[in-house]
Amino acid sequence: MPRIPVRAPLTACSLAGAQELTKQLEEHSRLRKVDEDAELEATAPTKRLIVVANRLPVTPRRARDSGEWRFDRSSGGLVSAFLGVKNMEITWVGWVGVPVPEEERADVTERLSKQQPFSCIPVYCT
């Protein structure tokens, strides 16, 4: 019965091929890590900021035809200054600016929490 070697000796050709393959795998791994890091950096906020101001960065209005609440971005300087801020989660706390009936506050609060680029937490003054 012929004996089969457990490990075949590497020839110069197969050694060079293995080294080249190792180099390619390392480069692929490095590039994949760079891509993953870039994706994480682009999607994950790096800091959190809570702005407490007298007004929210949006002005609520009722749509004439449907009566639904609509939120238009305010044109104030503080709002404009934060529009260019990237990689930061910004939450804005402030007065809504108009009277909101008690029975509609839960809906308005939920919709304001989903505003972009700033999540809003309304303060209702009665």
Image (cartoon, rainbow, N blue to C red):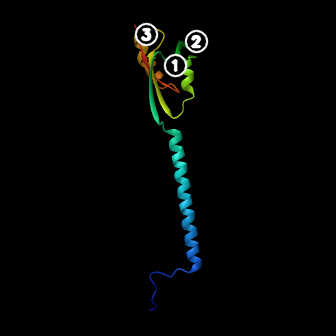
- On the image, the x and y values in percent for residue 10 come to 53, 79
- Indicate which label's residue lies in the foreground, 2 or 1: 1
Is 63 above or below relative to 19? above
Q: Earlier in the sequence, mark 3 or mark 2?
A: 2
Which numbered disc, 1 or 3, marks the residue closer to the eye?
A: 1
The numbered mark at residue 101 is: 3
- Is 51 or 35 nearer to us in this picture? 51
SS of the residue at dot 3?
Answer: loop
- The answer for how far apart the CA atoms under marks 3 and 2 are is 19 Å
Report the residue at 54% width, 62% height from top: 25
Residue type highlighted by circle 1:
Pro
The answer to whether one can see residue 69 in this image is no
Three-letter amino acid code of the residue under disc 3: Pro
Q: Which residue is mark 1?
A: 57
First in sequence, mark 1 or 3: give its number.
1
Assess disc 1: are there few (<14), some (14-19) or many (≥20) residues with their C-alpha within 10 Å of its C-alpha: many
Instruction: Say above or below: 1 vs 44.
Output: below
Lateral position of residue 111 relative to residue 23, left or right: left
Q: Quadrant of the N terminus?
A: bottom left
Do the residues under discs 1 and 3 have CB atoms within 8 angstroms? no
Q: Nearer the viewer, mark 3 or mark 2?
A: 3
Q: Find disc 2 in the rendering and name its residue.
A: 65
> Quick one: SS at disc 2?
loop
Which label's residue is closer to the chain start, 2 or 1? 1
Residue at 54% x, 40% y: name it: 42
C-alpha distance separating marks 2 and 1: 24 Å
Question: Residue 104's x, y, as percent?
Answer: 43, 14
Task: Give the image location of residue 94, x and y in percent.
Answer: 44, 16
Image quarter where the C terminus lies is top left
- Residue found at x 46% / y 8%: 99
